[in-house]
Every structure is written in C-alpha cells, then in structure tokens.
Amino acid sequence: MIAWLGLGSILVALGAALALAWRGLPALMGRGSAPMERMRGPVPWLLGGAAAAMLVLEIGLLAGDFSIAYIADNHRAGTPLIFTIAAGWAALEGSIVLWGLVLAAFTGAAFRSMYRRDHPLAGATLSVLGMLAVFWFGLMATVANPFAVCTAAADTAGCAVSGWAPWSAVDLPGAGRGANPLLQNHILMAVHPPVLYVGYVGFSVPFAVGMASLAKVDHGETWLRTTRTWTLIAWGFLTAGIVLGAWWSYEVLGWGGYWAWDPVENASFIPWLLATAFIHSSVVQLRRGVLQSWNYVLVIGAFSATILGTFLTRSGVIASVHSFTQSSIGPVLLAFLAVVLAGSLALFATRIHLVGSAPRLDSLASREGAFLLNNLLLTVFAFVVLSGTLFPLAVEAVQGSTVGVGRPFFDRWAVPLSYCLILAMGIGPITPFRVARRHVVWERIRTPIRISLGLSALLVLLVSRNRHVIVVVLLAVFVVSAIVRHLATLARRRATAAGQGSMAAAGYLMRRDPGYWGGQISHIGVAILAVGIAVSANLSASGSIALSPGETTPFAGYEITYRGPFSRAEPNRDVLGVRLDVSRGGEAATVMSPSLNSYGNGAPPVVTPAVYSTPRGDLYVSLTRLDSSGMVADVWSYPLQWMVWLGGLVTAAGAGFSLSAVTGRRRQAVGAGRG
Amino acid sequence: MADRRAILAGVATLILAGIVGWGFVVGEPSNQDRVEALGARIRCPVCQGESIADSPTPYANDILAFVEEKVDEGWSDDQILDYLEARFEGIRLDPRFSGATVLLWVLPAGVAVAGAWLAARRLIRRPEPVDG
C-alpha cells in the first residue's frame, strides 16, 4: 500500500514537473511569454505530489512498515517519535524526498510571487525550475526510489535486497535496523537538515531566474533584484543550517570541536561564500551598473556548488557521517552537475557580448572598491576551499596515493583571508560611493579606531596577549563600533530634524533602508562569530582526566569529582555514563553526565559528550573509557564558545531583517493602494 | 581649547596603539602553543584523517609526547616535521610545498592576482586622453 501510494505521489510530481518545464519552454526560448493560466495548472500537482511523498514516507515510518526497504533499514521499533520523523531524511533516499518537497515549495512560492507581480521572467523561470524538478523526481522514480520493496530480508534486521516495483514479492524483515546511531542522538538532527536543505535548494530559484534572464536577453535590473531577494532567503537559511550543523557536531560527535574542514562542511561553505559575494556584488550593479556578467558567474557558481556538495556527500566518494552508503546515484549526480555546468555556461557564453559593460568606476577608494575587494577575497576563499576539498580526490584518482589536505592547510588560508574580510567589512559600509574623500572617511572611523584600540589595550593588559585574539578583537570591535557610530550619527541628525527620540529615529532609519541595515546586522554577527572562533580556539585548554570513584582533579579553574558510573535503559538505547560533580572556587556548579550510548544494532557505542555552558565559556567532557576501577575522559575548556553560535545566528538574522522589512513595506503599500 | 583636546586625543590614541603593539610583539607562542600547532599539522598514522592532536589513540599520544620533547629541546618546527616525515610517509596534514601540491598553494594566489588585474583593467575608468 505504502509502496503504491509513495511511488504514485512521486510520479504525479514528476508529471507536473514535466508539464511545467514544457509549458514554460516557449517563454524560455524567447517566443513570447507563458501566461499564468497555462503555468498555474501543474504547480499544485507538483506541490501535492511532493508533499504526499514525504507524508506517505512518514506514515510508513510511524506505522513501522518494514516491507519498505528504506524503513526496514532506517527505523527500529521503540525509536522516540522525533527521531522516527527525522528518519524520513536521515538516509539517502529519504533525504531526496525532502529535497524534492523543498524544491516544490520554492517553485510554488516563486510562482505566487512572480505572477502576482507580473514578472517578465516568470514563465521562463518556472520552466527552468520545472526542469530541475524533473531531475530530482526522476531520480526518486528510478535509481533512488524511497519506496522500493524489500524482496529479501537480511539475517538479523533490515533488508538485504530490494526491488523497485511496488508489485514485487515482499520478504518482510522481522525487525528494522534503525538509523545511524549518530543521527538519532540529538534533537538538532530534526532541525539541522531541513534548515540546511532550505538553504541549499533555495539557490535553485536564483539560478532559474538567472538562466531565464540570459535566455531572454533581459539582463536589466529586474532579474538582479528578484535574484537578490531569493538569494537572501537561501543564504539566511544556509547560514543558520551551517551553524546548526556545527552545533550538532559539537554536541554529538564528542571530538571536542565544531568545525573540522570536513569535505561535507566545505561543501556547504563554498556556496555560502559565493552567495555572500553575490549579495555584495549585486549592489554594485544596482548602484553603478557594472559587474553584470560577474553576477551571472556567481549565481551559476553558487548553484553548481550546491550540486557538487550533494554529489560529494551522497555518492560515497568521501567517508563521512553524511555519506550514507555506497550508492548508485553518484554517477547520476555527477552527470547532472556536468549538464548544469555545461548548459548554463554555454548559455552564458552565447550571451556575454550582450551583457558586458564599459568601465565606469572612478576610483577604488570608494564603496564599490570595498565591494570589489570583498568579492576578490570571497572568491579566492571559495577557490581555496574547493581546491583543498577536491585535491586529495584528484591525486588519489591520478596517482593512487593519498595526500592529506587537512585543517592546517585551510587554516593557513582562512585566517588571513578572514582578517582582510573583516577589515573590509569595517571600512566598506561607511565609505561613500563613487569617490571617497579622505576627511569624510576619517571622520567616520576616528572614534571607532579609538574604541577598538582602547578595548584591545585592556585585553592586552588584563587578559591575553595571544596574537590572533588581539587582531580579531581589534578588528571586530572596530566593525561594531563603526556601525553603531554611523547609526547614532544619522539618528541624532534625524531626531533633531523630525523632533523624534533618537531610538525612534534609529528604528525609522533602519526600516527605511532594510537592505543596508540588515547587512550591518549580519556584519555584527560575523564580528561576534570571529571573536568567538578566535577566543575559543586560541585560549582553550584541553587534557585527559583519569579518576577513581570519589577522586577529584582540578581542570581549567574547575574541580571535577567522579561520583560513580550509572546505567539507564531507554526505549531505543542503553546509556552507560558517569556522574561528575563540577565545582568552581569551592561552590558546586553543576553535575555532568558524559556517556556511551548503545543503540543495540550491533554498532559500537556512540560517545556522547557532556557540555556545561556558562557566559564565561564551556566545559566539555567526553568519556573515553569506563571500567570498575575508574573512568578516563577527554576534557576541554572553551572560553566564550556561545559567541560562535550567537554570532552565526545573528548573521542569519540579518537576512531575515532585510526580507521582513521588504515584505512589510510591500504589504503596507498594497494596503494603502486598497484604501 | 579644541586644539588641546585634539592633541590629547592623538596622544591617547598613540599610547593605546603602543600598548596593543607591545602586546602583539611580546605575544610569542609558548612551547605549549607550538606543540599544539605542530600536533594539528601531523597526521595520526593509524587513524582516519585525524591529527595527532585530535586523536585519543596511544600511538598519537606517543608522537605528541615526542614532539613536546623536541620542542623543549629547542628544535625548530621544520626540523621536527622533517624528522617525522623521513620516518612516516605522508604524515603531514598540510601538504609540503613540492610536487603537485605546489599547485594548491600557487593557484589561489594566481586567482587573486588575476582577479585584481581583471577588475582594475575592466572596471576602472581611465582618464580621457588629452589631445596635445
């Protein structure tokens, strides 16, 4: 039943996607437009089919229908509700169902928003989105059918052989295997993938709009404004998704860190860097009419990077917690990437002569100069991450030998590039367009420089003389105080002129230019994030503690006492852990219980760290050995770790501010029109 | 009065800059910092892509202890890395500047230079030639 309903839903969505791509084709080929009536038909079918597929999969999981291979392999009786639902995207086929659902939702949203505004690129854009949907739903309908039936059960649990057809003879497995233990150990697993997917898939819309504008040779400002809005949505979610992923890694994996330059992390970081570059360079085009072709390159690059990331994570070329299984969809994804790149670049090449612009910038000492610097740095950054990720694969393919490109390589590039980026972030936004006069800029950075020097001097005298920490605090305080000073100055002027309070004036100014001030909120987020990264990395302490019951040891200002082991049987897992009393300066602070969790499917126990967070920083304990005589654990102390999470989320919130202010104003305008 | 305040502000700024600069100069890495930095650059030979600083295995800890010993004896970072590399092939996590890996270091720099050159050529308006 589930197999029929599921595959049926996928086929409905596939048909709708084909219809959408076909009906928009004349508009894409430049022969007129695709009227709304023709395009409206397939959209609800696409959305309905995609939603039904996800729903049927979830119902199958909740009902524990082990006749479906995916469910037999990724679900087990007794799994808590939240992880049963999360199992819907915890493995390869299910994650593609979620991908399809998000893509369908974006297609529906693009339809609504573009046709309501009578957008000239609406039909062509939806045609491209339809083509992308054809690929993903085609994947589900063929090589990655999430509703494949189990035709031969495995010996103990799960499914050994599965058949594509819903009418295949079922060999019902006696028990389910359960999802990868790492993926059912923390609540963030229910949140991080969907948020990240909205970010990833969101880049389909800017790509589709970009392709439509190239095909129709309509490269004015319309495509750029539309693309920028959709990019901001995707970018905000991608930012939040990356931060949540880092947080998950920190809370679950127990290796004491949150970012390892793992290929999968890199795969999400490359589109982030390119989209960040686009968000900035599009402003230069809107204000000064240059960089048209470059903006196309960035849009194509960001979208292709999401497909590359999906290929790297889903094809099994890289061993990681994200690469679910050795699967047959690797070559298909690679072929899709090749088609996307070849198609979009060919279209770009045939249109480039129509797109280019004459040199128009007067001076590099200007806002647009800072934007160019920003783009250069972000592009080089993306290139470094890309080449560092692919290089070991290339060497292994060519020479058969392994080459390590690890953390030190990325850090060596990332640190100086980030310093330059933060500096540009401090000076750029307060530098005027066209030509910046020296005294104007000096007036705006004088006080921020003094504030940042003052705070850094305090840091040097009282806290730390670590070079990285000094540089980052110097730059970050400069960025934040330059933004605050700028807003305060403008608000004071407006307050005097309009007879308002200065807070009200500041609020008014921010709402009036949401693009700019949303950007500044993101900049403040990045400054907080940078301080969090520099301080937690450079002023951390780490060690190993071995204690017998009742013993106490000092670590990083804390006293840690081992009270004893405990064990607890939960419906889906057995928890074996230790109780540690933690005190500071003689006062009891907290009780920590790091543990080893066994999920009973034969996999080795999962090390689950305990984290004690305070405004001062985190104490992080990861159990490595436990026997009758005592316990051994790795311990870390990370000062100001919370700034990493806060900074990341504030960065994402900046995009939210820009967008909410835009839609708020539009609603107001519509309301006023009606009145 | 205004002049006096400007001079005071200038002097104060210079003093603060001096303090920060001093902190930066004296902030030499300690031996412990060096051991940690080196540990992050050395692959744990029996693990999967982990550095000896990250890996909890006894083997990694032995190598880390060796690094600590040599740092305390005053060996330079390169001496330690060379010594280890002579004994374990591919032990460095940051690829050495030789062979194919040169590309990894040179290409990004090339992209940066090419990008800057292109931007300057294509985007900046040149002063109009004046007819003599």
Image (cartoon, coloured by chain):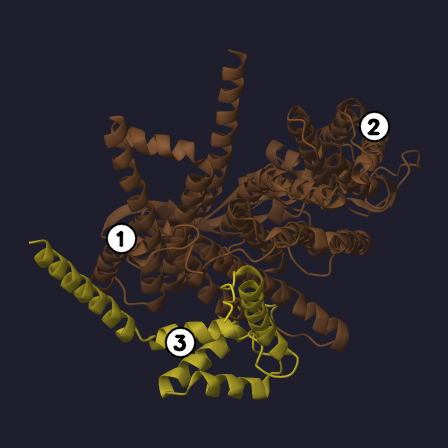
Chain colours: A brown, B yellow
* Cα distance in 3D space between marks 1 and 3: 41 Å
Name the foreground residue: B54 vs B118. B118
Percent x, y of residue A259: 51, 57
**Identity of the residue drawn at 49% across and 57% down:** A374
* Cα distance in 3D space between marks 3 and 2: 61 Å
Percent x, y of residue A367: 43, 53
**Identity of the residue drawn at 10% across and 54% down:** B2
Asked whether, in this view, residue A674 is left or right of residue A345, the answer is: left
Q: Report the mark closest to the observer, 1 or 3.
A: 1
Q: Name the residue under label 2.
A: A5
* Cα distance in 3D space between marks 1 and 2: 67 Å
Please state which amino acid type lies under the numbered disc 2: Leu
The quadrant of the image that shows the N terminus of chain A is top right
Q: Residues within 10 Å of mark 2 (few under 14, many from 20)?
A: some
Residue A256 against residue A525 in the figure, above or below = below
Q: Mark 3 points at which residue?
A: B34
Percent x, y of residue A546: 41, 63
Q: Name which of mark 1 and mark 2 comes first in the sequence.
A: 2
Name the foreground residue: A656 vs A120. A120
Please state which amino acid type lies under the numbered disc 1: Glu
Residue A133 seen in the figure: no
Q: Mark 1 points at which residue?
A: A443
Circle 3: element type:
helix
